[in-house]
Amino acid sequence: MAEPRERLPVGQRRVGELPTVSIGGPPRTTASAWALKVHGAVANAFELGWSAFQLSPMETVTADFHAATGWSVFALPWRGVPVAQLLERAEVAPRARFVRFSDGEVYDATLPLDEALAPDVLLAHLVGEHPITRDHGGPVRLVVPRKYGWKSVKWVSEIELLVDDRPGFWERRGRPTHADPWRGERGL
């Protein structure tokens, strides 16, 4: 099936569902024990537990997901808390320029602050009406639709505001910082 050029970046092929791809494995935590730490260059560092996360205002973003390994899944309906909402609560310091997302173990990715504030960037806990499975980053994963999937960190447990850029897991191994599927910035 030929895909419209504006929807499928060059070098990508459409697949029907998200393949399972991970660095490391799912953390041993359960949803009820999950917590998110928001800290760094902020006036109001805080920790958010599962119950408080569930009570936060949620939004649904339907977006395509593009992996640097060459596959794309169309129209995934992600539901979660907009990152912008969490950063507003944290009161980001004027000197902050980057946001680092981490699973608290081996994997992290950094975005420029303005990209992290985009309205379609979420900490998602549902895909469709179903909880995101552990293999796909549940209980909570970052969703950054305008970037290759390596920026959409699974098992997010930490958001750190930074003054200077700090390369993430894949950038430290040679992948380009911007991860733009429309420019083919997949590297390696």
Image (cartoon, rainbow, N blue to C red):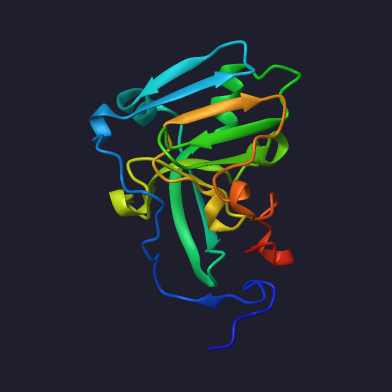
Q: Residue at x 63, y 77 (%)?
A: 11
Q: Which residue is drawn at 53% across and 14% down?
A: 45
- Does 179 sit above or below residue 6? above
Residue farthest to the top, as pictured: 43
Q: Quadrant of residue 89?
A: top right
Expressed as whole percent of the image width and height from the top left, the position of residue 88 reads 61, 22
- Does 91 sit above or below residue 80? above
Residue farthest to the bottom, as pictured: 1
Expressed as whole percent of the image width and height from the top left, the position of residue 64 reads 54, 63
Q: Quadrant of residue 70?
A: bottom right
- In the shown orientation, is residue 170 left or right of residue 80? right
Expressed as whole percent of the image width and height from the top left, the position of residue 25 reads 32, 48
**Which quadrant of the rendered structure holds the C terminus?**
bottom right
- In the shown orientation, is residue 137 left or right of residue 158? left
Residue farthest to the front, as pictured: 173
- In the shown orientation, is residue 14 left or right of residue 20? right
- Does 153 sit above or below residue 135? above
- Does 161 sit above or below residue 2? above
Q: Which of 135 and 2 is in front in this view?
A: 135
**What is the count of numbered marks?**
0
Expressed as whole percent of the image width and height from the top left, the position of residue 132 reads 33, 50
